[in-house]
Amino acid sequence: MNTKPMNTKPMSTDLDVEVLDPRHDPEPAYWAALRARAGLRADWAWDMLGTSAWLARLPLLVAVLHRAGAPVGVATGTYSGLPYHPKRFVPVRGGPLVGVWHVRAPASSALPGWWLDDGLTVRDVLRCRPAIGRGCAGVLLRQVGPEDLAVLPARARLVRPTEPTWTLPVHDVGDVTEWIGGLRRKRRAHLRATWRETNDDQRIVVDVATASTTDPAEVAHLLRHNENKYHGRFSPLPTAAGYLGALMRRDDVLTVTYRDRDTSALLAVGVTLDHPRWPMPRYWSMLPVERGGVRNAYFHHLTVLVDWAIGNGKQGLLLGKGKSEVKESLGAVPTEQSAVLVVR
């Protein structure tokens, strides 16, 4: 599907491109300040990019746009192509002989894989392609919104709609009771019952804390229950305890845990990446109810996060993709997204 762009603003011509491999290149001196300025979450920290890159099937490359020596944009993605070995980790050096740069947020397909300073557009990300590799034949952009789609070149591109992403605003409600009261009747009754019954359940202990208080190996083990439900030939690799360990040591990551009061066994867990305005629940899993899991824990967990977000002055929560009917019933708002392949 090709549509004529509404804005044909050309790419900036005064930009330099720096391509980095976080497995081998040291953290740039400007990286921490750039990440803070861009509002990028914990998974964009340089050590997290390196850990994620070593655990990937394909080379993860970071491209930084510079103007007059200062960073003004960044994009990250995997260099995907041929030959492809789905059962192998990324080679220590090198990459595909021919392929495309698959731009997406690190360790997630729910967010765009770029940030750009004022005056730049997603079209400027395309100028990174020649620096990715001699065999890089195009750029595949994930999570392209309508405004970004409008500035991309209409020629030599392929556009496919993808699942929308969902945001749950909470800045205009006073507390979790008010939030629940504003939902549709059926969901309102369900959440009120779930909130009351789970909070009164003496069998379990619910805790919201910095993620470093939770054992990442325990979390990785529990995540297998959720990952197994969606496993397929081209599914992402299971979340590694090493990656979780690095992520959960950070002070901008929190967990919501559900434990058996008597045995301390982990029954359910959510891992959230904090942000000044829009935290993002990143991982969730629970034991099946028939194996001792907590009934309706998913909904209770989201209610706990709403309560926490309101109490900490957040704008809302980024709920990512999937479960559209559920998220809509919680008051979340969709943003239409597309995947766009631009070939040279």
Image (tube, helix red, strand yellow):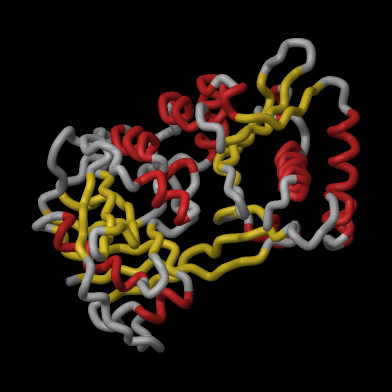
* Residue 11 x/y as whole percent: 26, 77
Q: Quadrant of the N terminus?
A: bottom left
Q: Residue at x 68, y 57 (%)?
A: 315
Figure check: 202 above or below 302: above
* Vertical position of residue 259 compared to residue 319: above or below: above
Residue at 40% x, 44% y: name it. Answer: 32
Q: Horizontal and vertical percent for residue 180?
A: 85, 54
Taking depth in this image into account, of 234 and 322 the one nearest to the observer is: 322
Is 333 situated left or right of 154 in this image? right
Q: Is residue 194 left or right of residue 330?
A: right
> Residue 50's quadrant in the figure?
top left
Identify the residue at image location x=66%, y=28%. 287
Q: Position of residue 337 (x, y in %)?
A: 48, 68
Occupied quadrant, residue 13: bottom left
Q: Position of residue 23 (x, y in %)?
A: 25, 35
Residue found farthest to the top: 263
Residue 101 lies, with reference to residue 86, above or below; the image says below
Query: With respect to residue 174, does 289 lie above or below?
Result: above
215, 310: nearer the viewer: 310
